[in-house]
Image (cartoon, grey):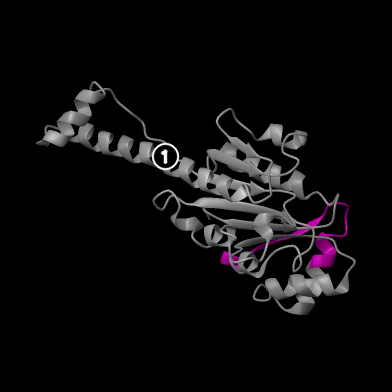
């Protein structure tokens, strides 16, 4: 379901970034991600990102206080693309009325003349923000001035309701991902952990998914192999 809030939790080397970029690449192929933004301190050195970045996509490497300005820029970019899409829809409606012989308004005529009555195929945009290696950064802080939790909360309303999917990667679940972000996660990707308390905290976040015993059985099964993970789709639970 788009937009989605996907949170990946796993230790260094577990495969979080690899899986996240593979997921993004798959969604790009199927058209559920058309515009990508990446916030990561390793943005300029991580070769994985080259698999998913297109010329118009944007990357931000500063995860200090300046990242909040980056978030504003990301939202503004989404709004601008959405505005173009809405104008394309308005034009197509006017063109359909004109070609079918229906009466057109002065506004319709202005739209048609501006584009020379040429056919246009609107492409619905779909946006995604990937926050990688951001644990301990400004956007994962618990301060009242952190605007990122509010963006996550209203992600479905970004760009006039087109929405912004957000993918986050962290090494630990409680100390790594603030509660406001955990509560709004729609999907979890949980990698192997030998820390009993960490596993229990993972279960608490997806406790409606299944019983604790069943969770532990599934978690151990799916994380048994190197880079294995348990995927929890909460909207479908």
**Is 189 displayed left or right of 126 in the figure?**
right
Q: Nearer the viewer, residue 125 or 144?
A: 144
Circle 1 SS class: helix
- Where residue 55 sits in the image (x, y, percent)? 58, 27
Residue 210 painted magenta: no
Residue at x-position 76% and y-position 78%? 212
Seen at 65% across and 70% down, the residue is: 179
Q: Nearer the viewer, residue 138 or 222?
A: 138
Which corner quadrant of the image does residue 37 belong to? top right
Is residue 27 placed above or below 121 in the rendered structure?
below
Q: Is residue 108 above or below residue 114?
A: below
Q: Is residue 219 left or right of residue 75?
A: right
Residue 212 versus residue 39: which sits nearer the camera? 39
* Above-or-below relation of 66 to 206: above
Residue 234 place in picture, x, y as percent? 61, 66
Does residue 47 appear to the left or right of 24 in the view shown?
Answer: right
Q: Which residues are magenta?
A: 219-237
Extreme residue in the left direction: 103
Q: Position of residue 188 (x, y in %)?
A: 68, 61
Q: Is residue 229 magenta?
A: yes
**Position in image of residue 132 (x %, y %):** 71, 48
Tell me the quarter of the image containing the C terminus.
bottom right
User: Disc 1 marks which residue?
Assistant: 80
């Amino acid at each position: 379901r788009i937009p989605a809030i996907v949170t990946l939790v796993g230790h260094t080397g577990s495969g979080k970034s690899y899986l996240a970029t593979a997921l993004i690449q798959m969604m790009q192929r199927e058209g559920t991600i058309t515009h990508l933004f990446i916030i990561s301190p390793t943005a300029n050195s991580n070769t994985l990102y080259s698999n998913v970045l297109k010329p118009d996509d944007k990357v931000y490497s500063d995860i200090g206080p300046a990242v909040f300005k980056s978030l504003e820029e990301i939202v503004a970019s989404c709004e601008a693309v959405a505005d173009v899409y809405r104008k394309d829809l308005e034009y197509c409606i006017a063109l359909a009325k004109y070609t079918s012989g229906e009466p057109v308004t002065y506004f319709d005529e202005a739209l048609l003349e501006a584009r020379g009555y040429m056919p246009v195929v609107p492409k619905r945009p779909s946006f995604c923000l990937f926050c990688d290696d951001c644990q301990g950064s400004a956007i994962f802080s618990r301060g009242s001035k952190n605007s990122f939790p509010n963006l996550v909360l209203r992600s479905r309303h970004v760009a006039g309701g087109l929405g912004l999917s957000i993918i986050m990667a962290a090494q630990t679940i409680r100390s790594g991902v603030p509660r406001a972000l955990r509560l709004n996660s729609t999907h979890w990707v949980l990698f192997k952990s030998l820390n009993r308390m960490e596993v229990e905290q993972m279960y608490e976040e997806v406790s409606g998914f299944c019983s604790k015993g069943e969770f532990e059985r599934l978690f151990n099964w799916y994380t048994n192999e190197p880079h294995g993970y348990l995927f929890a789709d909460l909207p479908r639970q």
